[in-house]
Image (cartoon, rainbow, N blue to C red):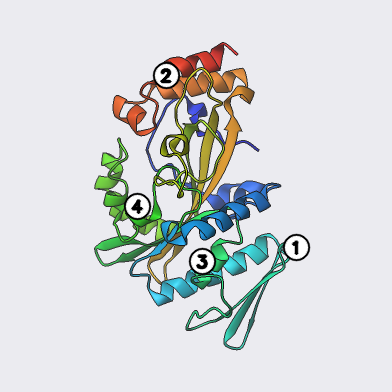
């Protein structure tokens, strides 16, 4: 399994939504658990130890949406991975057991009150059981906003900067999004009522560290933390995000999942390298700047074709 969205040879910011029902096997799963499962969970633990306020934010999260999302995550995990998770409902309470870590979560169905310390909410607790990151988008009349973001593997953006903002504000820094932004309301309604969908995003990284929050942890050099310095000595990786969008028509909201994968550029096959180079060359100057590639194309060509 390898997710390489650049194989088209053209860089695009189009939504590229694929109905997940049309996928097969592993690609049909909402959540993807792989051999490095514990490493991803450790990254979330590290974020919590540093300052979870950087990685988990809420604004105007409706209780009805919160209840629906929490129930969906727990039930879907049990459905997809019955040997990993157990989920049950008994009277007014829900119980979720992670059979891998032996962690038990218990919460009240209506109040969403979580029993026991350690997490900020039920949503926070459930997000820390999987390798995906999450966002909840709420729609209401002519408005939409990011009601919650749980992002422990940020790719050069932070949850605190996007929570509470609408679709156009969230995507304002992304070049080439003008057409999608102009018609985003219809697209969001389609996601709510016709999903779930899968889409992909990709970029080139100089490390395989999950956490690239714009602000480094205390005591960490900012230039080193930032990365993206592509030179003759850099080790390059394709950083791909598999993103799922699951609608909740009953609350007019959708869940957005982000699952990060890394692929060493040096291990790409020749036709994959050619497609990557073609996709980079198709980027506008603005997109190259946004992706951190403006001054790196020469070194990238050497990495792709001289190794």
Residue at horizontal 49 percent and vertical 70 percent from the top? 120
Point out residue 273 in the picture as x, y percentages from the top left corner.
55, 20
Q: Do the residues labelled 2 and 4 touch (CB within 8 Å)?
A: no
Look at discs 4 and 1 and give the one toward the viewer: 1
Looking at marks 1 and 2 on the same chain, the residue that comes earlier in the sequence is marked by 1
Q: Name the residue under label 4.
A: 187
Quadrant of the image occupied by residue 173: top left
Circles 4 and 1: CB atoms closer than 8 Å: no
Q: Distance between the residues labelled 4 and 1?
A: 36 Å
User: Height in image: 155 above or below 5?
Assistant: below
Image quadrant in which the C terminus is located: top right
Q: Mark 1 points at which residue?
A: 83
Question: Which element carries disc 2, helix, strand or loop?
Answer: helix
Residue tagged by mark 3?
Answer: 124
Residue tagged 2: 297
Q: Which residue is drawn at 52% across and 36% down?
A: 239
């Amino acid at each position: 399994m390898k997710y390489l969205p650049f194989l088209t040879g053209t860089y695009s910011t189009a939504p590229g939504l694929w109905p997940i029902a049309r996928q097969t096997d592993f690609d049909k799963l909402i959540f993807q658990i792989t051999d490095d499962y514990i490493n991803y969970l450790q990254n979330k633990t590290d974020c919590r130890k540093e300052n979870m306020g950087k990685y988990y934010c809420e604004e105007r999260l409706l209780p009805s949406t919160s209840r629906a999302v929490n129930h969906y995550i727990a039930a879907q995990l049990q459905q997809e991975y019955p040997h990993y998770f157990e989920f049950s409902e008994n009277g007014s309470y829900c119980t979720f057991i992670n059979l891998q870590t032996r962690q038990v979560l218990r919460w009240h169905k209506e109040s969403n009150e979580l029993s026991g310390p350690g997490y900020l909410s039920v949503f926070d607790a459930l997000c820390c059981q999987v390798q995906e990151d999450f966002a909840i988008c709420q729609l209401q009349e002519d408005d939409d906003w990011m009601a919650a973001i749980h992002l422990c593997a940020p790719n050069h953006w932070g949850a605190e900067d996007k929570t509470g903002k609408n679709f156009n504000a969230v995507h304002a820094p992304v070049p080439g999004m003008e057409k999608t932004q102009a018609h985003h309301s219809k697209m969001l309604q389609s996601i709510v009522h016709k999903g779930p969908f899968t889409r992909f995003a990709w970029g080139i990284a100089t490390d395989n560290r999950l956490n690239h929050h714009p602000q480094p942890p205390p005591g960490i050099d900012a230039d080193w933390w930032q990365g993206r310095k592509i030179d003759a000595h850099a080790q390059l990786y394709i950083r791909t995000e598999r993103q799922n969008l699951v609608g909740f028509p009953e609350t007019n909201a959708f869940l957005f999942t982000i699952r990060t994968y890394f692929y060493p550029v040096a291990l790409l096959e020749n036709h994959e390298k050619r497609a990557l180079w073609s996709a980079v060359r198709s980027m506008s100057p603005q997109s190259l700047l946004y992706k951190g590639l403006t001054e790196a194309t020469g070194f990238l060509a050497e990495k792709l074709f001289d190794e």
